[in-house]
Image: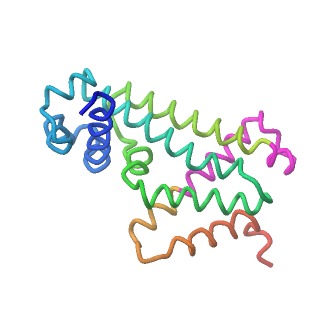
Amino acid sequence: MRGPARRAVITAAALEVFAKKGYHGASLSEIAVQAGVARTVLYDHFPSKRSLLLAVMQEQNTALMRHVGARIAGAGSAEARLRSTIDAYFSFTETGSAGRRLLFDHVDEDDAEIRTVRQGIRESRARAATALLAEDMCALGVDPREPIAEAMVEFIIAGLDGVAQCWERNPEMPRSMLVEGVTRLLWSGLGRAE
């Protein structure tokens, strides 16, 4: 196996182990077994468990933003793009639940560098989503350069992830039902219920 292919196998194994056990619960030995490589091979690609975790977090955030960002910036009406974006997030959750768990669930790490990187990933994700939504925000009368714009995006991201966590506890709910419910809430809002 060539270097890039082996690295991909290692990061895929690491994703599963880190998502399930967190940074402290995971061991390089377990990741090596999951990847089907000797532990020393891990060190050919990553100098430490921390560097492996950070690489996997960056990789998963890039995958999430690529998956969802294409829908935000896609064609169609604002409502159609909203629905498509929500569906994309739940699609990522459905097919990449380990990535979602790694990015959103393991927030209690006591390693300062990991916390700093995790916060940087979160902020860059919010800034990227805000930039993608800039035109829609302007149409709502919200300046996308103002701090409230990023706060609104954080609210949407956190809300979508809360629904994704609920879905993991209740997997019998169809994705289409979740997409419809969240779209209706975000598009129409609670204030228009009357």
Q: Is residue 167 above or below residue 102?
A: below
Residue 63 among magenta residues: no
Residue that appears at 68% across and 50% down: 72
Rendered-image quadrant of the C terminus: bottom right
What residue is shown at x 62% (from left), y 50% (from top)? 155
Magenta region: 135-160
Horizontal arrangement in the rendering, residue 181 relative to residue 103 (left or right): right
Q: Is residue 142 magenta?
A: yes
Q: Is residue 115 left or right of residue 16?
A: right
Q: Report x, y in % for residue 168.
A: 40, 65
The percent coordinates of residue 16 (x first, y second) are 29, 48
Which is nearer the eye, 119 or 191?
119
Residue drawn at 38 percent across, 45 percent down: 102
Q: Main secondary structure of the magenta part?
A: helix
Of residues 20 and 62, the one nearer the viewer is: 62
Residue 71 pos. (x, y %): 65, 52
Residue at the spot 36% in from the left edge and 51% down from the top edge: 98
Colour mode of the rendering: rainbow
